[in-house]
């Protein structure tokens, strides 16, 4: 499957100000969400694949909140 990503996010002032962990996590979420923009929350898998501790992931998710919606703690939706 091929996906198109908005490469202009790298020039968006909101994105520029993010911590590198949040930038990495957002890119990971874009790459791994399904075609509808949903992804299951799985801290252990994300931690292993990103080589990032869970507390960094949680902090990064808070920083990414303007781009994410979550109706449960089990699934995220990327706007």
Image (spheres, rainbow, N blue to C red):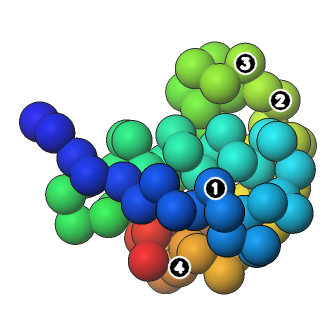
Q: Nearer the viewer, residue 33 or 17?
A: 17
Image-quadrant location for residue 48? top right
Q: Earlier in the sequence, mark 3 or mark 4?
A: 3
Q: Which residue matches tag 1? A: 10
Left or right placement of residue 27 versus residue 40 in this view: right
Question: Which quadrant is home to the C terminus?
Answer: bottom left
Residue plotted at (19% across, 57% down): 35
Q: Secondary structure at mark 3?
A: loop
Q: Earlier in the sequence, mark 3 or mark 1?
A: 1
Between the C-alphas of marks 3 and 2, the distance is 7 Å
Q: Residues within 10 Å of mark 2 (few under 14, many from 20)?
A: few
Q: Residues within 10 Å of mark 4 (few under 14, many from 20)?
A: some
Left or right placement of residue 23 versus residue 9 in this view: right
The reply to whether discs 3 and 2 touch (Cβ–Cβ < 8 Å) is no
Q: Earlier in the sequence, mark 2 or mark 1?
A: 1
Left or right placement of residue 78 versus residue 48 in this view: left
Q: Which residue matches tag 3? A: 51
Residue plotted at (52% across, 40% down): 28
Q: Which residue matches tag 4? A: 69
Q: Secondary structure at mark 4?
A: strand
Q: Secondary structure at mark 2?
A: loop
Disc tally is: 4
Q: Of discs 1 and 4, which sits in the foreground?
A: 1
Is residue 32 at all visible to an observer of this figure?
yes
Q: Residues within 10 Å of mark 1 (few under 14, many from 20)?
A: few
15 versus 50 height, above or below: below
Residue plotted at (39% across, 41% down): 31
Between the C-alphas of marks 3 and 1, the distance is 22 Å
Q: Which residue matches tag 2? A: 53
The image shows residue 8 at horizontal and vertical percentages of 52, 62
């Amino acid at each position: 499957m091929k996906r198109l990503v908005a490469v202009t996010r790298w020039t968006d002032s909101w994105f520029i100000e993010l911590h590198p962990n949040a930038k990495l996590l957002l890119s990971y979420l874009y790459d791994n969400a399904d075609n509808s923009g949903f992804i299951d929350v799985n801290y252990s898998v994300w931690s292993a694949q990103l080589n990032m501790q869970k507390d960094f992931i949680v902090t990064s998710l808070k920083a990414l909140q303007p781009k994410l919606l979550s109706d449960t703690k089990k699934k995220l939706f990327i706007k």
